[in-house]
């Protein structure tokens, strides 16, 4: 039993040298965290933009394409947040306020957005409900950007 435990511990030690596992180890550098969140936002913005173009009528409504983009927005909406690690406000970061210093406010705005993004796939089945839900989702993006994003 003891031998087994020691072997297990040894295996863990060698594993952790290969893949450093610690609270902040998802990103080696602050700029990696910035890049991660901006990439997620950028993809999400692209797909919400496609939905907005259909909602505005500048692109013909296509239910299958709309639902695909809506599902992507829903999935991508879960990603940027991990990238807001404390101290990642330098380099290319475009922050108006530090999310980690106003964590409650930031979390509230994020939760609002996640709630609206969750309704997008169903709403994308027809143009009328898509219009409404693109508007509702877009206003949650705007709500956070006004406070936290530097343009
Ligand atoms: C809870 C806050 C919050 C919400 C909600 C939010 N954003 Fe952002 N967004 C930010 C912040 C902060 C930045 C700036 C990040 C940085 O530069 O470090 C940003 C940046 C962006 C960028 C620029 C990325 C780049 O390449 O620099 C895009 C595009 C974007 N958001 C799209 C969206 C869309 C679309 C939504 C809604 C579906 C959304 N955001 C919702 C906080 C938010």
Image (cartoon, grey):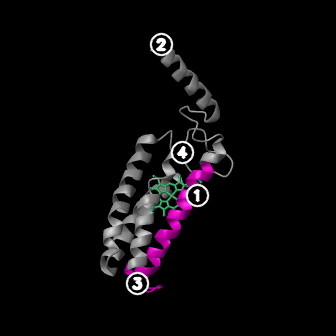
Give the Cα separation between the discs numbered 1 and 2: 47 Å
Q: Crowdedness of circle 2 by 10 Å Cα count: few (<14), some, many (20+)?
A: few
> Does the rendering let one see residue 13?
yes
Picture disc at residue 2: 2
Q: Are marks 1 and 2 in contact (CB under 8 Å)?
A: no
Mark 1 / mark 4, whichever is N-terminal = 1
Residue 143: percent from left, percent from top: 43, 58
Residue at position x 57%, y 26% from top? Answer: 11
Bounds of the magenta segment: 34-63
Q: Which residue is mark 1?
A: 39
Q: Crowdedness of circle 4 by 10 Å Cα count: few (<14), some, many (20+)?
A: some
Residue at position x 59%, y 25% from top? Answer: 13
Mark 1 / mark 3, whichever is N-terminal = 1
Q: Are marks 4 and 3 in contact (CB under 8 Å)?
A: no
Mark 2 / mark 3, whichever is N-terminal = 2
Residue at position x 56%, y 50% from top? Answer: 96
Q: Which residue is mark 4?
A: 84
């Amino acid at each position: 039993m003891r031998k087994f435990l020691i072997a297990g511990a040894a295996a863990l030690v060698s594993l952790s040298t290969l893949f450093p596992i610690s609270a902040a180890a998802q990103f080696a550098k602050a700029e990696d965290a910035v890049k991660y969140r901006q990439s997620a936002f950028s993809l999400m913005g692209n797909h919400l933009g496609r939905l907005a173009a259909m909602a505005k009528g500048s692109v013909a409504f296509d239910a299958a394409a709309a639902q695909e983009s809506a599902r992507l927005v829903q999935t991508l909406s879960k990603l940027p947040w991990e990238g807001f690690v404390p101290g990642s406000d330098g380099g290319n970061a475009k922050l108006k306020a530090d999310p980690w210093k106003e964590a409650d406010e930031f979390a509230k705005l994020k939760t609002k957005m996640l709630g609206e993004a969750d309704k997008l796939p169903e709403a994308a089945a027809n143009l009328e409900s898509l219009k409404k839900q693109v508007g509702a989702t877009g206003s949650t993006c705007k709500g956070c950007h006004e406070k936290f994003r530097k343009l």
